[in-house]
Image (cartoon, grey):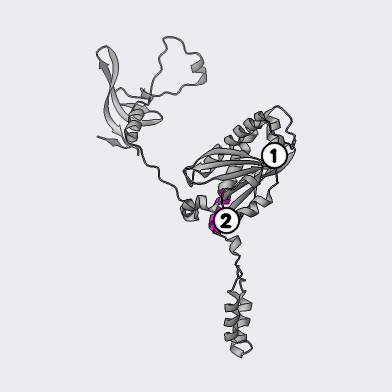
Amino acid sequence: MADVLSQGEIDALLSALSTGEMDADELKKEESERKIKVYDFKRALRFSKDQIRSITRIHENFARLLTTQLSAQLRTFVQIHVASVDQLPYDEFIRSIPKMTLLSVFEPYPLEGRFVMEFNPNVGYAMLDRMLGGKGEALNKVENLTEIETKIMTQLFQRTLETFRESWESVEEIDPVMDDLEVNPQFLQLVSPNETVVVISLSTTIGETSGMINLCIPHVVIESILPKLSVHLWMQTKKKERQPGEIESLETNLKKAPLDVVVELGTSQISINEFLHLTEGDIIELDQSIEDPLLVRVGDHSKFKAQPGKKKSNTAVQITDIIDEEGNEDE
């Protein structure tokens, strides 16, 4: 970021230009020289800062959801947070991870291509140990995975993809499916060595074991949805379209909802002593005149005025006026 000059520095610069102590042409020459930057084509920066910030926010949500999921599944202390988000060549990512590790390779349908989630062996075996009833100890034996251990880990990693799908649904509806479980990164060739990838590193603690989970997303795989990662588009609320017949169904169900309708004959005030000595046959005088209309309440709101009567052999009321929301009567 360019330096911001204070008002005093601006005044001093204008004064130097006006007195001839500084030459404006020299300043222009220096400015043109500063525009030349060294660019390494092997480390092409293909993600904008705006897109990196959006990817960071998505995976901060992924870290929170994954923390909740693994805590419930492993029944132990789990803490996961985003440690860093970097873009680098794929070859550099492969060289940065251990020679023998746990690599969950999955396809994010409908996107074309593959992602990879690398679980540090300490983290992976702590998860496996907890699933098998242990204390969550990290026993690094990646080279000698049994068929049962491979099956359990595959199922465990597949469940993490449900959380991954949920964290991305605000940007793109994807259906990630696990494709393979690898242990040697040298045999894993997702894209060309110079292809730019974004690597999200998650610092992970399971019980007393700590390690990293690294998620590698190639640029070429998510290139089609990158415009959706710009801030003004990503923050917009997507308006949900109503399905055919949904409004009619809502109206039908709403009309079936029960309502409490109460006709108030009147009110009265008596003392507690009088209330305690009420017996069968006592008469309570109401403050309502027999000529006044009765108040009809719907829930807690006064909605109608009515007069008492009978319909066949049943006691009934006849609505005479409608009370609007402001308490006025509609004739």
CB of mark 2 within 8 Å of CB of mark 1? Answer: no
Magenta region = 48-57
Mark 2 packing: few (<14 Cα in 10 Å), some, or many (20+)?
many
Residue at the (46%, 43%) spot, across then down: 110
SS for callout 1: helix
Let me know if residue 273 appears in the view. Answer: yes
Q: Position of residue 125 (x, y in %)?
A: 70, 35
Residue at the (46%, 52%) spot, across then down: 224
Q: Position of residue 303 (x, y in %)?
A: 34, 31
Q: Amino acid at mark 2?
A: Thr
- Judge whether residue 53 is colored magenta: yes
- Main SS of the magenta part reads helix
Residue at image mark 2: 196
Which of discs 2 and 1 lies nearer the camera? The answer is 2
Give left or right: position of 210 versus 220.
right
Given residues 175 and 65, the one toward you in this image is 175
Q: Any mark on residue 123, and which? A: 1
Give left or right: position of 287 versus 278.
left
- Judge whether residue 41 is colored magenta: no
Give left or right: position of 163 versus 321.
right
Mark 1 packing: few (<14 Cα in 10 Å), some, or many (20+)?
many
